[in-house]
Amino acid sequence: MFKIFKIVISNILQRLSIVRSDINRNDKQGALARAWGHVYNNSIVGDYVEFGVYKGESVISSLKIRRDFNLWLKSQYQSDEKWRRDFARNSPLNDPQIFHCLDTFEGMPFNDEGSISFMQGNFFTELSKVKAKIEKQNSEKINVKYYKGLFSETRIEFLKSIKNRNIAIVNIDCDLEESTRDALCSINQNISIGTILLFDDYNCFNADNSKGQRKAFSDFQDKSEFIFEKFFSYHFAGQSFLVVGLR
């Protein structure tokens, strides 16, 4: 009887340790789940960087999804297969990523890009409230860094902070061509093959190649040493890309 009870408890604990993120969700959370799945499936070492934090919902989702994948990794310590135990214990992902959060935290900056949704002052928030909200959900006490201001203004601070660390996931949710251009300029030296880029507003501006994130990323690709490939689309206007090679 005790043996049966032990097996039942073991099976329950094993199920609880399995990552339950739904990769079939076509919203932002589903996109983040696929991004973190890509990172853990390939053991990609690198930080999480988000441009356009707003109220912090995506950062919180990423913290929770990352935690779930980390629980799965630790569950492999108890695998009955030696190679899984060895892989898990030696995984570079045992060292936690740093989360970098960049935003004006004062709403959209002045721009003349012609969208009512993205006019100056829209998406107003306050850094202190966002910090408190995120830290409340940061159960693993991941190191979360905040950079307040235009991306062009905080670039030096960000680069000094990230130094030579690799970036695994870049979540670019800043809507505008100019903001996206500044974001890409900030991460150019820290991405590598395997890095995933999420453009939350890629198909805004009617998916016009001459506007918004499409224009900014197209110009960036023309000058970049990296080769990018479309990965998956998500939500109403999102598109992800992978860094797949060097020119």
Image (cartoon, helix red, strand yellow):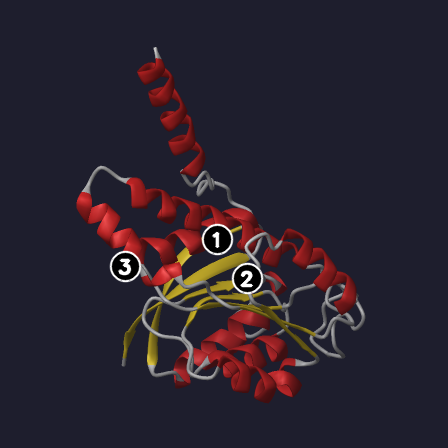
Instruction: Look at the numbered disc 3 and give the secondary structure of its residue.
Output: helix
> What residue is at 70 percent from the left and 80 percent from the top?
149
Q: Mark 1 points at which residue?
A: 66
Q: Mark 3 points at which residue?
A: 90
Query: What is the x, y in percent for residue 51?
Result: 60, 70
Q: Image quarter for residue 189? A: bottom left
- Tell me the mark number nearer the camera, choosing from 1 and 3: 3
Q: Is residue 73 above or below residue 163?
A: above
Residue 171 lies left or right of residue 38; in this view the side is right
> What residue is at 49 percent from the left and 50 percent from the top?
67
Q: Image quarter for residue 36? A: bottom left
- Tell me the mark number nearer the camera, choosing from 1 and 2: 2
Q: In the image, what residue type sits under mark 2? A: Ile
> What residue is at 47 percent from the left and 46 percent from the top?
68
Q: In the image, what residue type sits under mark 1? A: Arg
Residue 94 lies left or right of residue 186; in this view the side is left
Query: What is the x, y in percent for residue 238?
Result: 53, 57
Say which label, 1 or 2, has the lower sequence index: 1
Q: Name the residue under label 2.
A: 142
Judging depth in this view, the residue of 106 and 166 nearest the camera is 166
- Name the residue furthest top: 1
Between marks 1 and 3, how big is the CA–CA gap?
Answer: 18 Å
Judging depth in this view, the residue of 37 and 91 nearest the camera is 91
Residue 61 lies left or right of residue 220; in this view the side is right
Instruction: Look at the numbered disc 2 and give the secondary structure of its residue.
Output: loop
Instruction: Look at the numbered disc 1 and give the secondary structure of its residue.
Output: helix
Query: What is the x, y in percent for residue 245?
Result: 28, 73
Q: In the image, what residue type sits under mark 3? A: Asn
Between marks 3 and 2, how big is the CA–CA gap?
Answer: 20 Å
